Image (spheres, rainbow, N blue to C red):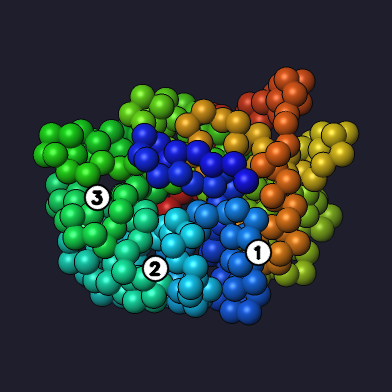
């Protein structure tokens, strides 16, 4: 495994990270624990979850899986999206974040999280309140580092400016949709993160599995796939995404590698990327993704991938999660 610093922090994270939003849904507890242990045995230390994944099951399962091995993991979770129907069960207020952090720590069976991330920008809470609360979490020892997700570039820059002005802990990471099928972060977010020393953590690096080649125009819902288990995922199966996936698969076949490994390896080479989180429902999927770490892309392959994905720089983001 290879490791990189998370932004300008001193924290070292595995180049390939483990995403866990399938835990408790498409992967049961036994399969999920097996995946966590297999990942860690292969050098993956970055494990990403959230307070709302599979209700709260993802965090609980990870807490079980890390028993006796917590010190080996860089554990990241999130809060901010709706965790219930009440008016104070969403957003980045001190009240909501404090309650959700305590719940996450209990489910994860740990005294601290390494990276605590705001899941989405909250337009209804002053950033000063959010950032002061996060700074207090760091001071208390319950959080080691803080990050954001689904922020626009101006929102991230405003947060960094406030932290600088107030002397608060700064965001060290930005989690955003980024892949061959979504290069919109290259327009503003990545230049900002390079300038400010913030590490990019791409989510949906395979565009929800589309870039793996499993979906085609004639077979859009393989059994057990995200599209098969989540009806809302069908909106992503657009002709443009499927055509891109077919082109990626052709290039991968010429190189003798899987489309998944090729897509992840391309992303690992992008500026500011610290770790690429990829989910798995079977250890075999994880093994294929691990091949991306040592996959060297020559200039011709990189040029070809850049060329076929260039139209996705100026389109709409593949995914973004926002509070209403």
Q: Which of the marked residues, 3 or 2, is nearer the chain's N terminus?
A: 2
Quote the CA–CA distance across marks 1 and 3.
40 Å
Label 1: which residue? 38
The picture places residue 147, in percent across and down from the top left corner, at 34, 47
Quote the CA–CA distance across marks 2 and 1.
23 Å
Picture quadrant where residue 174 is located: top left
Q: Residue at x 31, y 74 (%)?
A: 103
Q: Residue at x 60, y 31 (%)?
A: 269
Label 2: which residue? 51
Question: Left of 209 or right of it: where is 91?
Answer: left
Disc ID at residue 245: none
Q: Number of numbered discs present?
A: 3
Q: Residue at x 52, y 55 (%)?
A: 45
| Residues packed near mark 2 inside 10 Å, few (<14), some (14 to 19) or many (20 plus) | many
| Residues packed near mark 1 inside 10 Å, few (<14), some (14 to 19) or many (20 plus) | some
The picture places residue 152, in percent across and down from the top left corner, at 36, 39
- Give the position of the C terminus as an image quadrant: bottom left
Q: Which of the marked residues, 1 or 3, is nearer the chain's N terminus?
A: 1
Label 3: which residue? 123
Label 2's element?
loop
Picture quadrant where residue 99 is located: bottom left
Q: Residue furthest left?
A: 166
Picture quadrant where residue 151 is located: top left
The picture places residue 92, in percent across and down from the top left corner, at 24, 57
Q: Which of the marked residues, 2 or 1, is nearer the chain's N terminus?
A: 1
Q: Is residue 127 visible?
A: no
Quote the CA–CA distance across marks 3 and 2.
20 Å
Label 1's element?
helix
Question: Left of 298 or right of it: where is 182?
Answer: left
């Amino acid at each position: 495994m290879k490791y990189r610093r998370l932004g300008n922090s001193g924290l070292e994270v595995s180049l390939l990270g483990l995403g866990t939003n399938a835990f408790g849904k498409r992967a049961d507890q036994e399969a999920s624990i097996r995946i966590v242990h297999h990942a860690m045995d292969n050098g993956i230390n970055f494990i990403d979850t959230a307070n709302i994944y599979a209700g709260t099951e993802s965090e609980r399962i990870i807490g079980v899986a890390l028993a006796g091995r917590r010190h080996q993991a860089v554990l990241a979770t999130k809060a901010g999206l709706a965790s219930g129907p009440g008016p104070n069960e969403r957003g980045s207020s001190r009240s909501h974040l404090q309650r959700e952090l305590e719940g996450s720590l209990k489910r994860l069976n740990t005294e601290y999280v390494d990276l605590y991330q705001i899941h989405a920008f909250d337009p209804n809470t002053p950033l000063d309140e959010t950032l002061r609360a996060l700074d207090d979490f760091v001071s208390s020892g319950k959080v080691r580092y803080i990050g954001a997700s689904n922020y626009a570039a101006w929102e991230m820059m405003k947060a960094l400016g406030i932290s600088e002005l107030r002397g608060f802990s700064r965001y060290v990471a930005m989690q955003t949709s980024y892949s061959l099928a979504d290069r919109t972060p290259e327009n503003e977010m990545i230049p900002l993160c390079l300038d400010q020393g913030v590490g990019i953590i791409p989510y949906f690096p395979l565009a929800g599995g589309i870039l793996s080649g499993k979906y085609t125009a004639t077979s859009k819902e393989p059994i057990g796939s995200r599209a098969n288990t989540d009806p809302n995922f069908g909106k992503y199966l657009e002709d443009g995404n499927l055509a891109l996936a077919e082109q990626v698969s052709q290039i991968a076949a010429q190189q003798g590698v899987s489309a998944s490994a090729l897509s992840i390896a391309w992303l690992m080479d992008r500026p500011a990327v610290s770790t690429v989180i990829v989910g798995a429902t079977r250890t075999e999927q994880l093994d294929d993704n691990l091949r991306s770490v040592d996959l060297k892309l020559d200039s011709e392959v990189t040029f070809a991938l850049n060329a076929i994905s260039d139209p996705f720089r100026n389109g709409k983001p593949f995914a973004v999660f926002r509070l209403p």
